[in-house]
Image: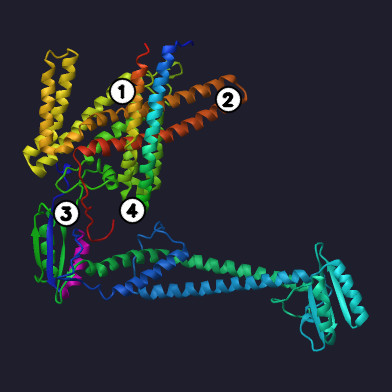
């Protein structure tokens, strides 16, 4: 049964003259078979230099990514897969970049213009009630002017004092409500006097920075600015449209180019991971065992027989990368190993057992026909709209089917045990037969934990031989047997003396001591807590049912009251069941997962091997 | 319905069994959860292991529940 073991691998070391390096890398990329072991020990042989093209590729890649983000492109761009790259992609890329740069510059200029106009407008708004043209505010030889805010009493004081000194001045004041805006003209010779006069009155001068002194009134200028702004707006819209069109037109090109450059980059940078001397390169890695002849032949072809390949079976001390090999029906459950850890090369691949037990536990906990249907629809939609969540969605769709199945066994539909006055057929009622449910849960626990020991036996057999396997894993089963026999003798089900069972348990403990050392003895109480832990199958399910029943009872109560209460009743039903479904899915998922990882895996699984990632195109 | 005092005490016992084991689990899980979130911020691929370590104390509540059910079984 190949799917119970990781795929067989072979170690391969490719050595060859440096001038064939590029061809070899290209061929390895095409084959997509070699999991490269990074060369790290540089004390004897150094790592290689990246290909000369690497720098140029990375520059182009930066350009492409900048453009992609400018155009707001993502990987889901339509038709991107069918686009073929022309030979002159570099020219095309520069052209796009140049056009985009020009458009962007123009857009920036418009933004600057907007800011300037805005500043000018703010100054004009202060002047809009003054009966002047703007050119009077420019600088004169003999006349000085001042503009600012002043309070009422200050204004009167200034007027009085000024008229006592000279009559060659003019004051225009506009009341804005909170302050008085004042525009003063005065002969230059009297300007210092005016300054001194204004100082103690709290006069706040206002300087014009953005104003143009043209012979038009402030209001005329404001309307000019408004026209200009409208023109700029339409110009901006046009430029943005052009930029968007460019993105639409060249989107496919950019996305295909990015993928292509990514690939080239991988090839160009590979030398950084391999060993190189002055004239030779050494690539070391792992290939699936059946590809050894193919790789050997291809290497010999691309190097005209100049490359030397050494292919070896994995050694016991090797950290072999693991390639899981499950049939299509169960490979979605590899998701749980991706989440946790890869099994070691010599270990069993537990995916198949997770496939058997995970949906079973999930269904047992969320056993309701209605909830199962809703969960199924949710995860079916998830799979359709999120391709990356495929494995996860598959796992939960299967689990939802299991929920529907258990729902039928328990005779539950959204917590109702009867529909239209007729009781749903059931084998076991969760809400009423709690003790039976507890016994079943614990029984499932005993089976699951022992399955773990059996798998552990297999792993130990491969790793440490028959004797250790029997002692370390068989010991547990003997201890269990001893306990069961003792218990049965105690209750007179078996007509044996008590010491028979106790003796068997003691033999088991001695085996454990031999196989697992003191650790085995320390973990003995863990056996009980592990098995009892499966009581959660009952507990989670029970809480889900009882919550559903409460929701149904409350809403029924409301609906019977009639009137507005009918609406409230329906709301309770909808919101309550939504919350209960979410809680149910999360709870059932996490607890089912935990039973796999903690109670099951601890019996046989070590894990920690690197995942097999072949050098080549990413899927 | 009228309960005799014995039944009432049994109910209190069952409640205590669940409630106190839940508090114990919460206290344990609080510390593990804090450390797990810290570890996840450093290395996201630890998610699977962090999850397992975090949920380990949950078994305490299950024990509490089993005891509660056994205690309630006394009322017959």
The question of residue A454 being in magenta is answered with no
Q: Residue A541: where, in percent of width, then height?
A: 36, 27
For mark 2, name the chain.
Answer: A
The residue closer to the viewer here, A90 or A524, is A524
Tell me, yes or no, whether dots 2 and 1 are on the same chain: yes
The residue singled out by tag 4 in the image is B43
Quadrant holding the C terminus of chain A: bottom left
The residue singled out by tag 1 in the image is A438
Q: Is residue A167 above or below residue A175?
A: below
**Can the viewer see residue A219?**
no
**A173 left or right of A348 in image:** right
The residue singled out by tag 3 in the image is A319
Q: Residue A364: where, in percent of width, then height?
A: 32, 28
Q: CA distance from mark 3 to mark 4?
A: 22 Å
Secondary structure type for disc 1: helix
**A527 left or right of A372 in image:** left
In this picture, which residue range is highlighted in magenta? Answer: A18-32
The residue singled out by tag 2 in the image is A566
């Amino acid at each position: 049964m190949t799917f119970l073991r990781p795929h067989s691998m072979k170690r391969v070391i490719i050595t060859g003259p440096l001038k064939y390096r590029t061809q070899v890398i290209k061929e390895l990329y095409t084959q997509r078979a070699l999991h490269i072991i990074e060369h790290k020990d540089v004390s004897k042989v150094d790592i290689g230099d990246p290909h000369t093209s690497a720098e140029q590729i990375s520059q182009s890649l930066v350009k492409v990514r900048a453009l992609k983000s400018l155009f707001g492109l993502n990987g889901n761009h339509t038709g991107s897969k069918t686009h073929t790259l022309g030979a002159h992609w570099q020219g095309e890329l520069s052209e796009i970049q140049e056009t985009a740069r020009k458009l962007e510059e123009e857009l920036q200029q418009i933004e600057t213009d907007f800011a300037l106009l805005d500043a000018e407008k703010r100054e004009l708004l202060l002047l809009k009630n003054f009966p002047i043209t703007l050119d009077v505010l420019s600088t004169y030889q003999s006349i000085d002017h001042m503009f600012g805010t002043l309070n009422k009493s200050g204004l009167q004081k200034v007027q009085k004092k000024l008229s006592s000194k000279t009559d060659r001045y003019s004051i225009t004041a506009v009341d804005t409500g909170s302050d008085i805006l004042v525009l003063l003209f005065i002969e230059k010779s009297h300007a210092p006097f005016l300054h001194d006069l204004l100082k103690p009155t709290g006069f706040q001068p206002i300087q014009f920075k953005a104003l143009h002194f043209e012979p038009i009134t402030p209001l005329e200028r404001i309307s000019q600015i408004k026209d200009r702004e409208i023109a700029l707006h339409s110009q901006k819209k046009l430029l943005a449209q052009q930029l968007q069109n460019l993105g639409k037109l060249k989107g496919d090109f950019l996305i295909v180019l990015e993928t292509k450059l990514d690939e080239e980059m991988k090839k160009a940078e590979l030398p950084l991971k391999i060993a190189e001397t002055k004239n030779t390169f050494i690539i070391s890695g792992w290939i699936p065992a059946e590809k050894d002849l193919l790789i050997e032949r291809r290497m010999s072809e691309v190097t005209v027989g100049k490359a030397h390949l050494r292919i070896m079976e994995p050694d016991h001390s090797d950290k072999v990368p693991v390639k899981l090999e499950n049939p299509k029906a169960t490979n979605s459950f590899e998701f749980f190993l991706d989440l946790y850890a890869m099994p070691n090369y010599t270990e069993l691949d537990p995916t198949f057992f997770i496939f058997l037990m995970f949906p079973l536990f999930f269904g047992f906990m969320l056993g309701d026909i209605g909830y199962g249907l809703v969960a199924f629809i949710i995860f079916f939609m998830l799979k359709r709209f999120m391709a990356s969540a495929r494995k996860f969605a598959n796992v939960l769709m299967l689990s939802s089917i299991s929920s529907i199945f258990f729902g039928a066994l328990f005779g539950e539909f959204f917590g109702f045990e009867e529909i239209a006055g007729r009781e749903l057929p059931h084998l076991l009622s969760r809400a009423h037969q709690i003790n039976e449910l507890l016994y079943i849960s614990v029984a499932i626990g005993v089976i699951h934990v022992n399955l773990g020991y059996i798998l552990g036996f297999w792993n130990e057999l491969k790793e440490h031989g028959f004797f250790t396997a029997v002692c370390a894993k068989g010991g547990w089963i003997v201890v269990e047997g001893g306990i069961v026999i003792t218990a049965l003798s105690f209750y007179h089900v078996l007509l044996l003396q008590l010491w028979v069972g106790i003796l068997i348990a003691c033999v088991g403990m001695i085996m454990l001591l031999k196989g697992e050392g003191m650790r085995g003895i320390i973990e003995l109480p863990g056996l009980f807590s592990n098995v009892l832990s499966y009581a959660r199958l009952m507990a989670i399910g029970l809480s889900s049912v009882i919550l559903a029943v409460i929701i149904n009872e409350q809403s029924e109560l409301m609906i019977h009251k009639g009137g507005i209460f009918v609406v409230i009743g329906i709301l309770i039903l909808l919101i309550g069941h939504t919350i209960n479904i979410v809680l149910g899915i999360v709870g059932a998922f996490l607890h089912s997962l935990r039973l796999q990882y903690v109670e099951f895996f601890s019996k046989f699984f070590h894990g920690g091997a690197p995942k097999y990632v072949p050098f080549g195109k990413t899927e | 319905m009228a309960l005799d005092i014995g039944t009432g005490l049994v109910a209190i016992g069952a409640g205590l069994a669940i409630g106190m084991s839940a508090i114990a689990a919460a206290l344990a899980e609080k510390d593990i959860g804090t450390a797990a979130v810290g570890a996840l911020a450093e290395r996201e691929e630890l998610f699977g292991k962090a999850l397992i370590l975090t949920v380990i104390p949950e078994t305490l509540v299950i024990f509490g529940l089993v005891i509660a059910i056994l205690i309630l079984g006394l009322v017959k």
